Amino acid sequence: MKVMGDTENKVGNKGEAAKRKWDKHYDYYFLGSVIFLYLLLFFFDPEGTCNSLKVSGNIIIQIIPVLLLVILFMALLDYFLHPKTVSKYVGKGSGIKGWSLAISTGILSHGPIYVWYPLLKDLRDRGMRSGLIAAFLYSRAIKIPLLPLMIYYFGVLFVVVLLPYIAIASLVVGEIIELIENRTRRNTVKYS
C-alpha cells in the first residue's frame, strides 16, 4: 500500500511541476496566441486587421502615462512595503482602517481600470484582502474631477445622496466577496 501512495505522490508532483511550468510561461503563450490570431485575421481581412492594430496602438499611447504611474507605484511598493506592512493596513486584521483606505484610494485613483490590476494583484500576493480589492474597484465609480459635471446634470441633492450610497455599496460588495471566498475556502479544505 505504501508503494502505491509513493507512486500517487510522484504522479501528483509531476502534475504540479507541469502546472507550474504552464503558469511560468502563460504570458508567452497568451502573447503568441494573440499574434497568431492577428496573422490569421490578416489573411481574411487585411484592412480590418490594420484598423484594429491602429486602434490598439492609440489605446496603448493613451494609457502609457497611467501605466508608468502604476509601474512607479509597484516599484515603490516593492522597495518600501513588506508583507507585514501590507497586512497591517489592508490585511486580515486591518478592520475599518483597511476599508477606509481601500475606498478612499479607489475614489482618488484615475486612469483606465485595467492598468490598476497588476498593482492590485501584487498587493493581494502580499496579503491584501480580496474584499478590499473589490471595495477599491467599486468605489472608483466616484470620480472627483467629474463631480461638477454630475452636479450640473443631476443636481446637488442627487449627488449628495448618491455618493455615500456608492461608498456603502462598495463595503457591501467587499463583504460579499469575502463571504464567498471564505465559504469556498472552507469547502475546499473540507473536501480535500
Image (spheres, rainbow, N blue to C red):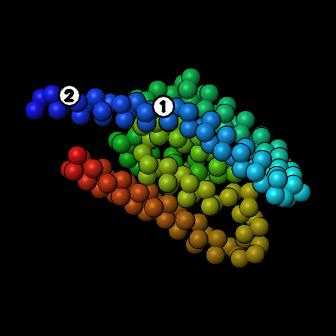
Q: Amino acid at mark 2?
A: Asp
Determine the secondary structure under disc 1.
helix
Q: Quadrant of residue 29?
A: top right
Identify the residue position indicated by label 2 in the image.
6
Q: For the residue carrying disc 1, how many other residues have a C-alpha within 10 Å: few (<14), some (14-19), or many (20+)?
A: few
Q: Say if residue 62 shows up in the picture.
A: no
Looking at the image, which residue is at 44% across and 49% down?
Answer: 130
Q: Position of residue 163 (x, y in %)?
A: 59, 66
Q: Position of residue 6 (x, y in %)?
A: 20, 28
Q: Position of residue 32 (x, y in %)?
A: 67, 40
Determine contact: label 2, label 1, CB under 8 Å: no
Q: 12 left or right of 18?
A: left
Q: For the residue carrying disc 2, how many other residues have a C-alpha within 10 Å: few (<14), some (14-19), or many (20+)?
A: few
Q: Is residue 55 above or below residue 26?
A: below
Which label number is shown at residue 21?
1
Mark in the foreground, 2 or 1 = 2
Q: 34 left or right of 121?
A: right
